[in-house]
């Protein structure tokens, strides 16, 4: 027993909570999906690769984790809008946790990057954080967990420290970190 007479499992229980995690088929996003679902949350995740997503879904199902999936390229506004419509249906128009995780890196010196590459990284790494937060705001208002809904943006040390050859990635992650200093709504 822990402080207050509650077990660790009870204190960290997310039973009944719902979560949307972008970029959940690998890396940090995959780990976040498994942790949230492992603590009892129903999770919906998305990724660009249907094959990777289906492989993950099968593994999660075999482990009894409550995870649903959909293919979504978060760099595309229409697909983000469709993702939120799917989440509304899956979770009965309620959402407790939004995790903006999906991102891409580009290993190139800034002077070698094209305008198209800049635009693509901004539309993949930064714009979805704002847009998905805005789209899910009405759902988060109906959050069932104590304290209300939460938005978690996964940034990177690359947004604080410069790494050679990763200027654009650092710009997107630094912008994300800076935006967290202000309330979205």
Image: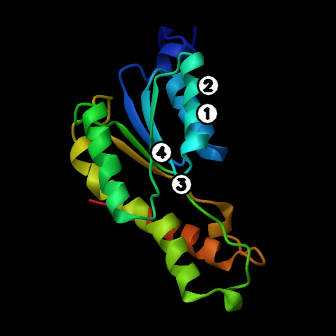
Q: At which x and y percent is residue 100?
A: 47, 52
Q: Which mark is residue 102?
A: 3
Q: Which mark is residue 55?
A: 1
Q: At which x and y percent is residue 131?
A: 34, 62
Q: Is residue 162 above or below residue 173?
A: below
Number of callouts in the render? Answer: 4
Q: Which mark is residue 59?
A: 2
Q: Is residue 134 left or right of residue 57?
A: left
Q: At which x and y percent is residue 128?
A: 42, 62
- What residue is at 31 percent from the left and 51 percent from the top? 82
Q: Assign a secondary structure to mark 4.
A: strand
Which comes sooner in the sequence, label 3 or label 4?
Answer: 4
Q: Assign a secondary structure to mark 1.
A: helix
User: Which tag is nearer the camera, tag 3 or tag 1?
Assistant: 1
**Are discs 3 and 4 less than 8 Å apart at CB?**
yes
Q: Is residue 172 above or below residue 63?
A: below
- What residue is at 52 percent from the left and 74 percent from the top? 120
Q: Residues within 10 Å of mark 1 (few under 14, many from 20)?
A: few
Q: Which residue does the numbered mark 4 point to in the structure image?
A: 46
């Amino acid at each position: 027993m822990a402080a207050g007479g509650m077990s660790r499992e009870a204190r960290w229980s997310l039973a009944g909570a719902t979560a949307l995690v972008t970029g959940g088929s690998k890396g940090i996003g995959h780990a976040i999906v498994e942790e949230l679902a492992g603590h009892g949350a129903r999770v919906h995740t998305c990724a660009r690769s249907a094959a990777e997503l289906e492989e993950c879904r099968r593994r999660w199902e075999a482990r009894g984790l409550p995870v649903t999936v959909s293919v979504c390229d978060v760099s595309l506004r229409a697909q983000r809008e469709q993702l939120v419509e799917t989440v509304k249906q899956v979770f009965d128009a309620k959402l407790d946790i939004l995790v903006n995780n999906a991102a891409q890196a580009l290993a190139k010196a800034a002077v070698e990057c094209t305008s198209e590459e800049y635009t693509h990284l901004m539309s993949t790494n930064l714009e979805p954080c704002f847009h998905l937060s805005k789209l899910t705001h009405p759902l988060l208002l109906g959050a069932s967990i104590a304290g209300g809904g939460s938005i978690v943006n996964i940034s990177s040390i690359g947004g604080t420290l410069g790494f050679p050859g990763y200027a654009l990635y650092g710009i997107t992650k630094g912008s994300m970190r800076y935006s967290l200093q202000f309330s979205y709504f």
